[in-house]
Image: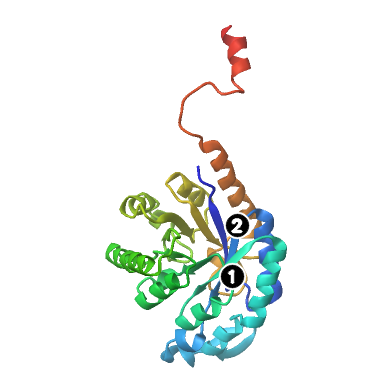
């Protein structure tokens, strides 16, 4: 069984505080994650005009929604520090660009992949531009129809051929509800995606409370697992309730690694540890 690539999605759960980001990086590295991931936006571009001036309470202060989005946005100073800190901790990092400005910003770093969020699956320009960076592209399929996924796949295939990108594109099954109801996870969708797109690497991006569902995704063919992580689910912010706390992250990673060891090759035979037992009990 191929080793699962595990991404701890910090997203904006750092609350705009580099020290919280570092604590989450420490936890992800200690748990055995392969990478942590953030989100990068240009709020002026991403926030619709009608929402920019809406009132928002944040950490005891009143502000506009646009001001709030800037409060939780990291810029070059913070990402330079993240880049250096992740190297020290021996863990990779990346971020999801929500606009062309953010993709250009991320291109200055030697990150191993570009992860497109489900919300950007229908943004053809951004899909192609991500492939043009030469980095592996991974994208999630939450809140999408089969027709929309087919279209995104075709855009990515054409772009991959155009820019001669040798990486296998990653396609993550996902439910975009935060948190996602277990009965709506449709993990069988992993099998569907694997059969429909054999040239893509299939994975799972989970937003549910459970851990076992993400481990089960490995049985169904996922080779990439992404889960949001947080210091505390009760923290202020939109993503914390759909995230895993430190203890849960350790359990998830250990569960995945145990499954990889236990999966085997499917050949029925007497194992080495069984041989002395067999000799004793069967003579």
Q: Badge 1: few (under 14), some or many (20 or more) residues near its Cα, within 10 Å? A: few
Q: Nearer the viewer, residue 38 or 207?
A: 38
Return the x and y of residue 179 as percentages of the image width and height.
48, 63
Residue 206, horizontal then vertical, whole percent: 48, 59
Q: Is residue 220 above or below residue 7?
A: above
* Residue located at (47% from left, 25% from top): 268
Q: How is the image coloured?
A: rainbow
Q: Residue at x 62, y 71 (%)?
A: 235
Left or right of 127 in this view: 44: right
Q: Earlier in the sequence, mark 1 or mark 2?
A: 2
State the residue lying farthest toward the bottom: 53
Report crowding for label 2: few under 14, some 14 to 19, many 20 or more residues within 10 A (C-alpha).
some
In the displayed image of the protein, which residue is found farthest to the top?
283
At mark 2, the secondary structure is loop
Q: Is residue 59 visible?
A: no
Residue matched to label 2: 34
The quarter in which the C terminus is drawn is top right
| Residue 258, image quadrant | top right
Residue, x 27% and y 65% (percent of image)?
A: 147
Mark drawn on residue 110: 1
Contact between marks 1 and 2 (CB within 8 A): the answer is no
Residue 36: give x, y in percent of width and height.
60, 64
Instruction: Tell me the SS state at disc 1.
Output: loop
Q: Nearer the viewer, mark 1 or mark 2?
A: 1
Q: Would you place residue 43 above or below residue 9 in this image? A: below
Q: Measure how far apart labels 1 and 2 are at the Cα level.
A: 15 Å
Q: Is residue 7 at all visible to an observer of this figure? A: yes
Q: Is residue 203 left or right of residue 237?
A: left
């Amino acid at each position: 069984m191929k080793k699962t690539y595990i991404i701890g999605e910090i997203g904006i759960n750092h609350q705009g505080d580099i020290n919280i980001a570092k604590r989450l990086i420490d936890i992800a590295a200690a748990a055995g994650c392969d990478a942590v991931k953030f989100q990068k936006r240009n709020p002026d571009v991403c926030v619709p005009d009608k929402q920019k001036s809406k009132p928002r309470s944040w950490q005891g202060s009143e502000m506009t929604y646009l001001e709030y989005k800037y409060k939780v946005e990291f810029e070059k100073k913070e990402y330079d520090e993240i880049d250096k800190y992740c190297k020290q901790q021996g863990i990779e990092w990346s971020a999801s660009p929500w606009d062309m400005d953010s993709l250009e910003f991320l291109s200055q770093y030697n990150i191993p992949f570009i992860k497109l969020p489900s919300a950007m699956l229908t943004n053809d320009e951004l899909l192609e531009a991500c492939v043009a960076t030469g980095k592996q592209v991974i994208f999630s399929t939450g809140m999408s129809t089969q027709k929309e996924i087919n279209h995104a796949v075709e855009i990515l295939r054409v772009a991959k051929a155009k820019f001669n990108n040798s990486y296998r594109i990653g396609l993550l099954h996902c439910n975009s509800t935060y948190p996602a109801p277990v009965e709506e996870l449709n993990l069988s969708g992993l099998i569907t995606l694997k059969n429909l797109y054999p040239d893509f690497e299939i994975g799972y991006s989970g937003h549910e409370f459970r851990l076992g569902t993400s481990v089960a995704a490995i049985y169904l063919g996922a080779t990439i697992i992404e889960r949001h992580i947080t210091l505390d689910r009760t923290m202020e912010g939109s993503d914390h309730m759909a995230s895993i706390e430190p203890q849960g992250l350790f359990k998830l990673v250990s569960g995945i690694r145990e499954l990889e060891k236990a999966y085997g090759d499917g050949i029925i035979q007497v194992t080495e540890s069984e041989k002395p037992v067999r000799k004793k009990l069967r003579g």
